[in-house]
Amino acid sequence: MITLYDYETSMPGKTISPWVMKVRLALNYKGLPHKTVWFGPFDMEEHAKPLGLPANQTEIADDGTVGRYTVPVLHDSSTGEAISDSTRIIEYLDEAYPDTPRIIHPETKTLAVAYEHTRFTEICKTAVKNVVLHIYATITPRVGSFMSSRVMSPEDELKYREMVKKNAGVDHTELVANKEVVEGMWEKAEEGLTLLDGYFRMAKLKFGPESEGVKGGFLEGSKPGLADFSLGGFLIWMKRGLGETDEQWKRIESWNDGRWAKYLDAMKPYSEIDE
């Protein structure tokens, strides 16, 4: 049985990490049965060590050492493997379950990572960074309302606020109070997603709207790939973090002729959570 480790919340969809959502999308796309172990936001190491689950070697801990316990972590009891880091997990699933749809093709692994990084991280970093900052600022004041009281103690809530401040580079109260800054962030976010939208439009112009690999509407063609699960994970997180009826989410849905609402519709079959 495949087990995915995730933070427990009471927010819609339960999961709070876009990187865990990236792996969930991949598991569902492959049709692989799995279960979730839920735990508190600062209890990863406590759960990981007894099971022999590794620290994420692509992360740097606060003391500067390599390796930090983060989600997602996946444990496969059929092989005994335990893996952290979302991209490495997806690579493992491709290799361990070759009869399922492949996400990262063997001959293009370096290209896949480069593509994900440049097309998603670099090109979209303005959009993602600014939307993420706003969601941090929006979510943090009501963190107690979506984090289960059993999971989020007052001490953990303080840790969470400090973590948000470290990641966002600004205290959420300062950010929320400055409406002009917030509006500027959303304008930059739209610029970032509009840049990405331009690549979709360019592909249609070059190859035709009905060309194989274009009409599917995914970044990697007619079928979703690594970059799609990264982008999809973040868009789902944004929607759940802001709230489906939130005016800012409605704003995102309206951008680029509704492309991102349609994009999530295409991801919907893979976004279910197996408890």
Image (cartoon, rainbow, N blue to C red):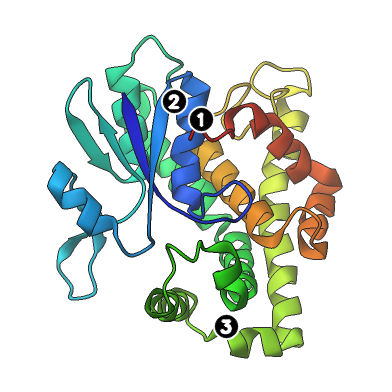
Amino acid carrying label 1: it is: Gly
The label shown at residue 103 is 2
- Compared with residue 204, is residue 140 higher up or lower down, i.e. above or below? below
Q: Name the residue under label 3.
A: 172
Q: Is mark 2 on a helix, strand or loop?
A: loop
Amino acid carrying label 2: it is: Ile
Q: Do the residues labelled 1 and 3 touch (CB within 8 Å)?
A: no
Give x and y (percent) for residue 147: 52, 63
Q: Mark 1 points at which residue?
A: 225
Instruction: Please tell me which of labels 1 and 2 falls first in the chain.
Output: 2
Amino acid carrying label 3: it is: His
Q: Residues within 10 Å of mark 2 (few under 14, many from 20)?
A: many
Give x and y (percent) for residue 120: 53, 49
**23 with respect to 265 (left or right):** left
Closest to the observer, 185 or 194: 185
Q: Residues within 10 Å of mark 3 (few under 14, many from 20)?
A: many
Q: Residues within 10 Å of mark 1 (few under 14, many from 20)?
A: many
**How many numbered discs sit on the rendered protein?**
3
